Amino acid sequence: MGFCWYFHLPKIASRIEVKDHAVGSLELLLSLHMDLKRRVLVAPTASFLELCERYSPRTLESLRSGIEAGIVEIALTTAYDPDPFSISHQRCLELMEWDAAAKRRLLNVAPRWFMPGNYLWVPGMERHCFALGIEGIVLDSRHYEEATSLRVWQASSTTGELQVRRQSTVLGVSETSQLSRVEYSQGKILSICWRDWPATQALTFGNLSAIHDFDAEWNVKNEWAALEVDRQLVIIADDGDRIRGKSRSGYMTLLSLETNEFDWSTHVRSNSGVMLHGLPGFIPPGLRAILHDSTDAQAYWKLLREVDPRSLSMAQFEEFLSLHDVFYAFWPDVARRKYYIEALLDFVEISMLWKGKVQN
């Protein structure tokens, strides 16, 4: 079994929020892995690390200690949590580069794994991975189903409307229990580790899964047995703030299950597993309505595209990148949404004035 945890907070997060995530979740998680000597992949965004530098430097020390002990492996993410379907490839690369630079500066590491926020994947991201020295990526098992299914066009018998039906190939979903590899041009290969969505959903996801239950120890063992896990590899991957004080006993039980441990440091170069020839784009079910279909989100992504980065100073450009964050779409907090909109409109105005001067 392997464990992978993602941590992110936006630039405008408060000290209380940072302490809550850094001390209440990440440090707790690290202490459990250190005590039980179970390896873990941690994927903190540059935004989260820079907030820890300001408000919780002890958390960075805990991460460094885990890295030195060989317990913690650090994954590359993006500096903020963007929707790669709504921004350019160049912006996505800049966010990945910023993340890599922050991890070199604050943790003295050069990550070999990449974990995209929300498991969103756009074809072309592999080029950024190769450019930044990435050898393996963590994706969702439902993405595997997309990558290994045939699309069959079918006309409705009543309306004649064309519909797409997915048809599974001979590769079964159980293959996600193994490492896969995807081959690109010039023989470049990325290892893929698939998070087991059914296991993650049952054991750690949300606030109602097994590790959060009142009788967590029994529930974790019961859910694990119900999953009938006979696969070679199970990857639990989720947002790190799922781990809280009330989840401690349940998570310890999960870590203590007698399963084969996944070593993130050595498996990134594995030569085993199903070879795929390309990865389609992927959005987890339910996210499309939030990120793409809502009028509010569409208006925000449109405003982002109206800003010409050439009109911005370096400091303004860094601020502009921080606005490429899905927190705008996720958060119902009106005050914070107001911050994003007003900051973005300022940059749109700067860009319009700059374009006017260039044209004249």
Image: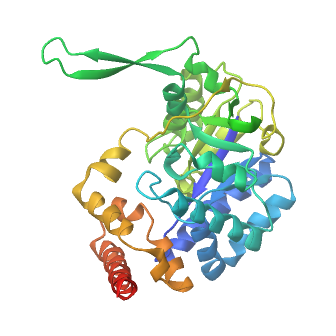
In the visual, does 38 lie left or right of 21? right
| Residue lying at 50% horizontally and 71% vertically, measured from the top left | 321
Residue at the location (49% across, 72% down)?
A: 322
Snapshot colouring: rainbow
- Taking the image as shown, residue 159 lies to the left or right of residue 241, namely left
- The structure residue drawn at horizontal position 61% and vertical position 39%, both measured from the top left corner, is 236
Considering the image in quadrants, where does the N terminus appear?
Answer: top right
Residue 209 visible: yes
Q: Residue furthest right?
A: 69
Residue 14 seen in the current view: no
Q: Say how many tags the image has.
A: 0
Residue 274 percent across, percent down from the top left: 69, 23
Work out whether residue 98 or residue 302 is closer to the camera in this orientation and state it: 302
Q: Which quadrant of the structure image shows residue 328? A: bottom left
From the image, which quarter does the C terminus lie in? Answer: bottom left
The foreground one among 226 and 270 is 270
Q: Position of residue 55 (x, y in %)?
A: 60, 80
In this picture, residue 249 sits left or right of residue 156: right
Identify the image quadrant of residue 3.
top right
Q: Is residue 122 above or below residue 160?
A: below
Q: Position of residue 48 (x, y in %)?
A: 58, 69
Give residue 192's position: percent from left, percent from top.
67, 36
Relative to residue 34, is residue 334 depicted above or below? below
Residue at the outermost front position: 360
